[in-house]
Image (spheres, rainbow, N blue to C red):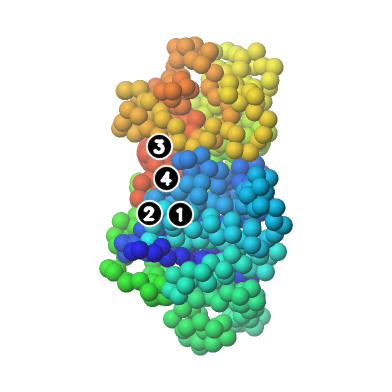
Amino acid sequence: MNQTKYIFVTGGVTSSLGKGIIAASLAKLLQGRGYRTTIQKFDPYINVDPGTLNPYEHGECYVTDDGAETDLDLGHYERFLNVPTSQANNVTTGRVYLSVIEKERRGEFLGKTVQVVPHITNEIKDRMQLLGKSGDYDIVITEIGGTVGDIESLPYIESVRQLVWELGENNGIVIHLTLVPYLAAAGELKTKPTQHSVKTLMESGIKADILVCRTEHELSDELRNKLALFCNVKREAVIQSIDASTIYEVPNLMLEEGLDVVALKKLDLPKKAAPDLKNWNTFLRRLKNPKHTVNIGLIGKYVEMQDCYKSILEAFIHAGASNETKVNVISIHSEHINSDNVEEKLGPLDGVLVAPGFGERGIEGKIEAVRFARENNIPFFGICLGMQMSVIEYSRNILGYADANSTEMNEKTKHPVVNLMEEQKTVTDKGGTMRLGAWKCDIKANTLAHKIYGQKTISERHRHRYEYNNKYADELQKAGLIASGVNPDTGLVEIVELENHPFFIGVQYHPEYKSTVANPHPIFVNFVAAAVNKHVNTHKK
């Protein structure tokens, strides 16, 4: 292919319809047909990136290999396609305006009045084509965040209009995702919200090429014909997206609806062979037909909003399918755990994961959860802050340092077993200043970590400011907390584990970011296997 083709995905009627899942599912089908495909997300908020956003505001912050702090939808893209994303795959309004203002300060606009059109829209269009011009992709899918009609989305919608016109016939198409609600009182599905949404899009100069309709009930032929007529799309381009039991069913549902075929036809591209979904469907079959069930406690401080731990929850789905096991993740707020109720809350569990996070709130509950899992031989997995809590717990209860802590929680602790990295001590800005992205880790032989990974050197993604304090490494090692993984360049301890425990491991990095359908993360796979083993042995007694 000489020219990269572009697909733009917009949303209407309401937010949270699943544009990211539709985009990822279409990309999966196009990838399965042999097209080099990538997805990018343009977010209308003015933050430069989601790195400084409260998880309650925007869910988890997903991190790429190159250290970009991005929208959680990029996690879906990677999990579906098994292809890494980068800084170029996520753009916010804040980043766009920052770039334009910096150009204006440098005099690049030759004293012109800087305006939304053409300066902001040109910047957006340049970024929309960045991946396409790399030569690495045949098709670039661009998801536009927000809902059509939002003030914040207007520059993006205008940029899409211009770009579709500039690209020419068959080189750029628009997929519009809407809601067809069911009114119980009337006993029928209603098309009017979709009609209004398409009309709003047309008022901005964009004609939807394909309509994807989210619905709780099957769309009748009559309804599809009505939508096609009043929304000015072909009948074959009215695609039903019915509620599914798991997001991983959506590619198959879109295949049945012919979304990929219609898109290729409108882009004037050959269908090639039918998508190869053999491995995908093997995963789905194992997911839907588990042989075991385990209960794993997720100990965190943002548990009221599941999207805060999106990648962890998805990694459990991948690892569960790999073990032919249904993983029931039981969210437990760390602020609600103490020595009086820890046995009641954690005793019945088959595994305990202490989640990442920032700040002092809920820390003592996490430490108590680590202690209980360690002393009662419950499989334990700590991620980032969770790993640091395991170091603090061991220092307090085994080394006898009662006030052991992280300087993040207590700057005056006499035993800062976790402290601020040297390079972080002069940092004043919060955004994009942590240790971010992929870093190497050397793994010691004959350890649990080596058994899990099966290799000497690994690369994992980071997002943290505080680290294991190497001044306490010898003491902790002699007392039984083994540093089994170390960064070869900085000496930073990346992995800790216990020898005489069924499964106890803490990692400074975020393994959940790299778990995909095609490659479930080995720590999650082994953690779930240990939970299954505990469950089976417990019920034998």
**Do tag 1 and tag 3 residues touch (Cβ < 8 Å)?**
no
| Residue in the picture at 47% in, 62% down | 141
Q: Which residue is mark 1?
A: 131
Local packing at callout 4 (Cα closer than 10 Å; few below 14, some 14-19, many 20+) is many
Which mark is in front, 1 or 3? Answer: 1
Q: What separation in Å lies between label 4 and label 2 (alpha carbons)?
A: 23 Å
Quarter holding residue 17: bottom right
Q: What separation in Å lies between label 3 and label 2 (alpha carbons)?
A: 31 Å
Under circle 3, the secondary element is helix
Amino acid at the residue labelled 4: Ser
Q: Earlier in the sequence, mark 2 or mark 1?
A: 1
Local packing at callout 2 (Cα closer than 10 Å; few below 14, some 14-19, many 20+) is few
Q: Earlier in the sequence, mark 1 or mark 3?
A: 1
x then y, percent, for residue 467: 55, 24
Which quadrant is the N terminus positioned in? bottom left
**Do tag 2 and tag 1 residues touch (Cβ < 8 Å)?**
yes
Under circle 4, the secondary element is loop
Q: What separation in Å lies between label 4 and label 3 (alpha carbons)?
A: 10 Å
In this picture, residue 262 sits left or right of residue 48:
left
The residue nearer to you, when weighing 467 against 343, is: 467
| Residue in the picture at 61% in, 14% down | 415
Amino acid at the residue labelled 1: Leu
Which mark is in front, 4 or 2? Answer: 2
Q: Earlier in the sequence, mark 4 or mark 2?
A: 2
Q: Which residue is mark 4?
A: 515
| Residue in the picture at 60% in, 34% down | 433
Q: Which residue is mark 3?
A: 523
Q: Earlier in the sequence, mark 4 or mark 3?
A: 4
Q: Which residue is mark 2?
A: 136
**Do tag 3 and tag 2 residues touch (Cβ < 8 Å)?**
no
Amino acid at the residue labelled 3: Ile
Local packing at callout 1 (Cα closer than 10 Å; few below 14, some 14-19, many 20+) is many
